[in-house]
Amino acid sequence: MAKCQVVLPEEFMLKLSRLGKQTDAVAEKVLEAGGEIMLDKIKDNLKSVVGKAEDSRSTGELVSSLGLSSVKQDRDGNSNIKVGFAEPRSDGGSNAKIANILEYGRSGQTARPFLAPAKKAAKKPCQEAMVRTLEEEIKKL
C-alpha cells in the first residue's frame, strides 16, 4: 500500500492552533478534503490499468473496494486518513495483494503502476484542497 506523508507549513499550523476546541472537527474536514482528492486520482489511475491486459479477468471488484477510511489518531496523537481497499474479496482473496501485483508486477506480469503516479499527481491538489477547506472553516468561526 502506498504511503503519503504531508508535512504542514508553519503558517498552516498557526492557523490551526486558533481553532481551539474546534480543532479536531476541523482537522477531520481538512483531511477528508485531501483524502477525497487522492481517492479520486487513485480510482482514475486504477481504472486505467485494470482490465487492459489481453488475458485480463477483471471483475471490477478491486476498483469498487477502494475507499477512504474515517479519520483516526495514531499513538503519537497525529490524525490520519487512509485510502485503501476493503477486504476480503468475494472469493476470499486479498484486494491489497492484487493491487500490489498491479503496482509492481510479478514474474511474467508487467508492472502497471497506479498508486505512485496518483500520489505524485495529487499531492499539490490535495494540499490546496486542505488549505482551502481550513480557511473556509476558520472564516466560519
Image (cartoon, rainbow, N blue to C red):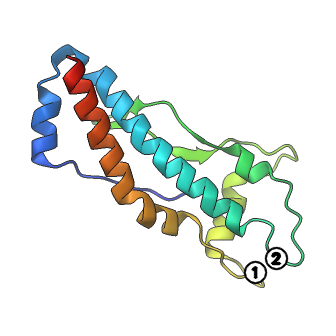
Mark 1: which secondary structure?
Answer: loop
Q: Secondary structure at mark 2?
A: loop
Tell me which corner region of the image, top left, top right, bottom left or bottom right, holds residue 17: top left
Is the residue 48 above or below the residue 82 in the image?
Answer: below
Query: Closer to the observer: label 1 or label 2?
Result: 2
Q: Which mark is residue 109?
A: 1
In which quadrant is the N terminus drawn?
bottom right
Left-right relation of 5 to 57: left
Q: Residue 21's x, y, as percent?
A: 20, 14
Find the distance from the CA under tag 1 to the CA under tag 2.
9 Å
Indicate the quadrant containing the C terminus: top left, top right, bottom left or bottom right. Answer: top left
Picture residue at 40% right of the left edge, 44% below the top: 34
Q: Which of 92 and 90 lies nearest the eye of the viewer? A: 90
Residue 126, x across and y down, in percent: 38, 50
Q: Amino acid at mark 1?
A: Gln
* 7, 40: nearer the viewer: 40
Tag count in the figure? 2
Residue under label 2: 53
Residue at screen point 34% across, 34% down: 30
Q: Position of residue 58 (x, y in %)?
A: 85, 61
Query: Which numbered disc flags the more N-terminal residue, 1 or 2?
Result: 2
Residue extending furthest bottom?
108
Q: Give percent across and percent down for residue 134.
A: 26, 33
Residue appearing at x 50%, y 67% in the figure: 116
Residue 61 appears in the picture as rendered: yes
Label 2 crowd (10 A; few <14 / some 14-19 / many >=20): few
